[in-house]
Image (tube, rainbow, N blue to C red):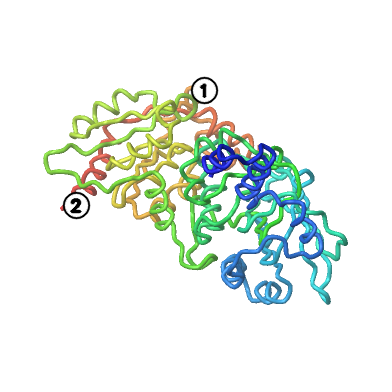
Amino acid sequence: MVEKLRRILVLGASPFFFLFLLSLLYLGEFGSQVVPSNQAKKQRANWGGSRIEDQENLHFLMEKLVQGGNQTDQQEATGFACHSDLHTDVCVSNRPVRIDTLTMKVYALFSQGMSQANRIIHPYPKKEEKWVKRSVSPVQILQGNISPPPPCRYTHNVPAVVFSSGGYSGNVFHDFSELIIPLFLTSHHFQSRLHFIVTDFKPIFFDKYRNIFSHLSSYEVINPAANVGVHCFPGLVVGLHYHDHLAINTTAIPRGYSILDFKQFLRESYNLKIRDLSPTEKPVLILISRPKSRMFLNEDQMVTMMKELDFRVVIAKPDMMANIGKFSKIVNSCSVLVAAHGAGLTNIIFLPQGAVMVQVVGLDLEWASTHYYGKPATEMGLNYLEYKIEPEESSLISHYGRDNPIITDPASIVASRGMLVGRAIYLGEQNFNINVTRFRNTVVKALELIGHLAG
């Protein structure tokens, strides 16, 4: 287009005419987001804002995010409904809204005859934890006859999902459990035709998971601090649906998704191929190596034993796991993943179906080990094995003695001194000196499982 305009100028058009045509080109190029002044006047006259062509399709997509008969009825009557449970709040509008990104106020169309109810949403799961709520910026939803509504500076023709990248983000378990899986649940059925507006914006988070965001949305993520102004959308979701730790409840909304669907989405996002192990090829075992708490103090002995069982052992340290694109391919190629209870086990989401996860369970970590990783592994189609350590395998004995209640009765410690003290001891202070002879039996079981599946 610019070349054509240059030719017009060469043929004798005045420079002023050339600048005029160039300005039209600019408006045509960016008009999908920035509303020209004459259009802005029209937008101020009504709440329509930017509309997608198929409004019925938008309503259908939004209905998937509404849970329960009462909420469905409310959305049909008013275009607006909210879901609230222990962990999260999610509000959905299938009618045009305006968002002032400076104040994070949402102006929603008010339906006559319905009660006005302004809301404040902290758009991150785990709202039951006070620290999370304090670390997540609120979004205020204003419903009512606001006249005149704030004029649109940016107009978009697809809906938006508003969420926070605050909270516990930065830890791979929390990244997937509380942000990425909930984002998949909330937005995947839009087929990339939506914007993400992210409060408490962390560039490092989006750089790390760029592949995932580019497969969930065809548009650049909107950082409110860098895109100040009133943004107008044909529909809006504030907050993310959350089901459980690394989990998707297939009976909840949106209908039809499972954790296996999410794993397939990850395979597509990171271009992970299904690879069959040849009969002459050694199976790969990945050992997650922790540098601080819950370390394997005799890691070298464990690796020697694994190699004697004819595994090709990959020791995964934090620097290897930092590049999730590369590490996902390594995990996808392995048959067994071994790790102490901790965030590194989140990488089971990249294991091929039928692979084996072996979790080393420390003292007083049984419940967390089962619910954070054990149950999710089974739902993901993996074989799950636990290795529960004996007290003699815990480094806590050398600190507190064999007869200390910290060793003999962990539950009493948590009950008398509180969960935070318990976490500090059993998660923060505990390392493992594994009985390699006893642990060998668990690794042999893992080898039998992958051999049976291969057969």
* Dot label at residue 120: none
Tell me: residue 298, above or below residue 237. above
Q: Amino acid at mark 2?
A: His
User: In the depicted view, which residue is nearer to us: 173 or 155?
Assistant: 155
For the question of whether residue 327 can be seen, the reply is yes
Which residue lies under the disc numbered 1?
A: 399
Q: Amino acid at mark 1?
A: His
The local crowd at label 1, few if under 14, some if 14 to 19, many if 20 or more residues have their Cα within 10 Å, is few
In x, y percent, where is residue 232?
Answer: 71, 55
Is 190 left or right of 119, judged from the image as shown?
left
Which numbered disc flags the more N-terminal residue, 2 or 1? 1
The local crowd at label 2, few if under 14, some if 14 to 19, many if 20 or more residues have their Cα within 10 Å, is few
In x, y percent, where is residue 135?
Answer: 71, 40
User: In the depicted view, which residue is nearer to us: 110 or 25?
Assistant: 25
* Dot label at residue 452: 2
Tell me: residue 184, above or below residue 316. below
Q: Secondary structure at mark 1?
A: helix
State the residue at coordinates (71%, 45%): 133
- Camera-near label (2 vs 1) is 2
Is 417 left or right of 377, judged from the image as shown?
right
Tell me: residue 327, above or below residue 350. above
